[in-house]
Amino acid sequence: MGTKRSLKSAGRQADRKPAAAKSGGFSIRIVAGGRWKADDPARRLYEAYAARLAWPVSLAEIESRLSDPARRHADEAARIRAASAEPAGRVLIALDERGRDIDSTALAKRIGAWQDEGRPAIVFAIGGADGLDAALRAEADLLLCFGRMTWPHLMVRAMLAEQLYRAGTILAGHPYHRV
């Protein structure tokens, strides 16, 4: 984790395909179940933090319209799997209430280590209202939670963007993170 990384503060559209993914640089991809409404306050919060990230970020919203809950859950898992398959060598982190509860500094260290290893991207999978499929959770490199409480899946995106911004500031030695 040796060197400190610089922070980019220029606004970046969060839904844009990351340029770094094409050039072989490190990027973040969030694959999330459900769709935001344009005026969702959590969306505005997500966009504010995503624009501050040190890494290019993209958000892929997936949604299944199947009426049968079991089929909808399986369809959503297949869509998440397809949207998170690339790039080769990426890290897959599944956000789930059954995951590991780590602090912000530990997350930053893991991200820094994966970046230093030359991993091209981290893909975060966030399930929809029914959560993530058990098989998809098992495929993840890390199963992560934001505490033991259940959070609305649309709000988790904003919480994740803030934690990614915080991780970037920790790695850069910026004073945003205070303990």
Image (spheres, grey):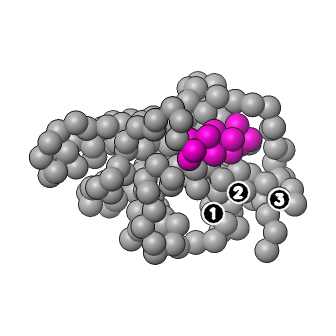
Question: Label 2 is placed on what type of residue?
Answer: Ala
- Mark 1 vs 3, N-terminal side: 1
Tell me the element at label 1: helix
Distance from disc 2 to disc 3, alpha carbons, whole Å, reads: 10 Å
Secondary structure beneath label 3: loop
| Above-or-below relation of 145 to 63 | below
Work out which residue is located at the far front of the displayed protein and give it: 39
Number of residues whose C-alpha sits closer than 10 Å to that of mark 1, classed few (under 14), some (14–19) or many (20 or more): some
Residue 49 lies in the magenta-colored region: yes
Quadrant containing the C terminus in the rendered view = bottom right
Magenta span: predominant SS is: helix
Disc 3 crowd, CA 10 A, few/some/many (<14, 14-19, 20+): few
Residue at the image point whose x is 45% and y is 72% from the top:
149
Q: Please identify the quarter of the rendering in which residue 111 is found.
A: bottom right
User: Where residue 95 sits: x, y (%)?
Assistant: 45, 58
Where is residue 5 drawn, in percent x and y? 81, 48
Q: Amino acid at mark 3?
A: Tyr
Residue assigned mark 3: 176
Q: Is residue 15 visible?
A: yes
Is 178 covered by the magenta stretch? no
Residue at 83% in and 53% down: 172
Q: What range of the chain is rendered magenta?
A: 41-53
Q: Amino acid at mark 1?
A: Leu
Q: Quadrant of residue 9?
A: top right
Residue pointed to by mark 1: 107
Q: Nearer the viewer, mark 2 or mark 3?
A: 3
CB of mark 1 within 8 Å of CB of mark 2?
yes
What residue is shown with label 2?
167
Separation (CA) of disc 1 from disc 2: 7 Å
Q: Earlier in the sequence, mark 2 or mark 3?
A: 2
